[in-house]
Amino acid sequence: MEIPGNVTTARQMGLVACTRCTKVWPGETERCGRCGHRMQSRDPGSLQRAWAWWVVGLICYIPANTYPMLSTRTLVSKSEDTIVGGAVELAHHGSYGIAIVILVASVLIPIGKFAVIAALAIGVRRGTRMSQLRRHQLYEVVEYIGRWSMIDVFVVAILSSLVQLGALASIAPGKASLFFALSVIFTMLSAQSFDSRMIWDRDSEPTPQPLQPQEVHA
Amino acid sequence: MPWAQDSEILSTCLRSGESAYVSTTNLLFLQERHEPVGPQIRTFRDVSRDLDQLIACPRCDAVYHVEEPGMGERAVCARCHNVLIAPRKRAGKQIIAIALAIVVLVIAATIFPFLSIRAAGVSHGSSVLDAALAFSSSSLLVVLTLAVAALIVFIPVLRALLVIYVLTPVVFDRPPWPGAIRAFRLSEGLRPWSMAEIFAIGCAVALVKVADLADVHFGPAFWMFSALVVLMMLKDSYMCRYSVWKSLET
């Protein structure tokens, strides 16, 4: 949804914008004079950091799926369930609805987040056919949904503190909960490191016409 | 000529489903303003005074000339639809009231049980504290106890307190208290990490999961958390960050 020619970026004007308080400063300014936030026209390390957090998050996501998330002990049985295993079990018992919800929330969404962040990062480097607005919206969705994945960890915490009925039944958290929480946190950090301004750079890249403060001084 | 462009932008914004009251007409584009003035005849002071009139979208770097929208209107970035300015009448007082309520509710909700379970004569209630401590049984998971407590209790309370600290002098037309700028910056930085409302939804999910296993009842804290979800959303939608930064500027 392009409004070609109408939008000028701070970078094109040789200015640098504070991403925290939206104030605009001359190009060389390092810290925002209003809120003290560190400023960079485009963060050169942004993609690298996003990828680094992405990889760590993905690594943590593997044990999150192989280790048990919950271990349930009742009078007669003791079972340890992984995320997928638990969903399959629920489906066997006939509660397809909950099984689908769990699969979507703890498998589909995390994998989707990894895929989207990777696609955005690659798109910035190589260019894509997807419109800038569409990519920006994807970024906003990932940033918004990211924190909601923590819900799984909270559910484990709630269940294992709630279901403590002595010998009758008890639930304890498994190792996977730690790795799942770490994976969520690292993906959030990955999304935050990604500089969304880069999505918009590609097409409108006529080299910045300098309005450098040095020239202005002279 | 600028008017033609503005109405075009306004219509594109509306077409793409931007809700509520979009007022991009108030954001005049900088290009026209700058054309007549060459950079070489400007002094540094002029530039900086000029820059005060500009804002850049933090999401996509588009620069706009500020003309503040009226109360209840919103100024939206023309290309990425990020809300830039959204002033509201008496927002300051309302936000302080909401923040106070959040502090009280979070602390109370930490102590009272949010769910209780009953099966075969045995019953057990669980509070947020218990939920966080659930991870302390194994040495590997102790970190999670701290993380959960921080995400659900400490960070939301800290954010609310910081906002009260920042806004109270602003509301009473006093100069900002020392460190207000750092306080607001911290509060903004912590925004994604405040997860009390996610915990509330987690309660509902957990309830569904154990419903067939045993009798489950909501405790008082569950309703407090439900109220928190609404309050947190209200607080974030009332807060016009642009206006706050503007008022902290000395």
Image: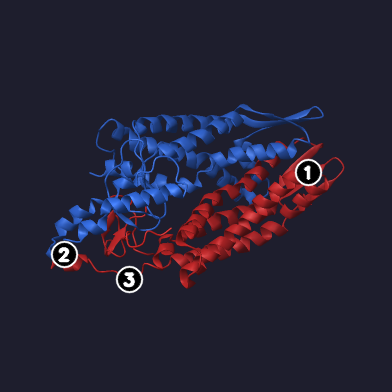
Chain colours: A red, B blue
Quarter of the image for residue B33 reads bottom left
**Marks 1 and 2, Cα distance to the nearest angstrom?**
70 Å
Q: Name the front one of labels 1 and 2.
A: 2
The residue indicated by pointer 1 is A95
The residue indicated by pointer 2 is B38
- Up the image or down, A20 lies above or below B196; here it is below
The amino acid beneath tag 2 is Gly
Quarter of the image for residue B236 reads top left
Q: Which mark is residue B105?
A: none
How many numbered tags mark residues here? Answer: 3
User: What residue lies at 25% left-to-right and 32% top-to-bottom?
Assistant: B173
The residue indicated by pointer 3 is A206
The amino acid beneath tag 1 is Ser
Q: Secondary structure at mark 1?
A: loop
Marks 3 and 2: in contact by CB < 8 Å? Answer: no
Q: Chain of mark 3?
A: A
User: What residue lies at 13% left-to-right and 68% top-to-bottom?
Assistant: A218
The amino acid beneath tag 3 is Pro
- Up the image or down, A117 lies above or below B70; here it is below
**For the residues tagged 3 and 1, is the chain the same?**
yes
- Up the image or down, B22 lies above or below B216; here it is below
**Marks 3 and 1, Cα distance to the nearest angstrom?**
57 Å
Q: Name the front one of labels 3 and 1.
A: 3
- Up the image or down, A13 lies above or below B238; here it is below
Check the image and name the residue furthest to the right. A76
Q: Quadrant of the N terminus of chain A?
A: bottom left
Q: Chain of mark 2?
A: B
In screen coordinates, is B67 left or right of A158?
left
**Marks 2 and 3, Cα distance to the nearest angstrom?**
19 Å
Relative to the observer, which residue lies in front, A198 or A170? A198
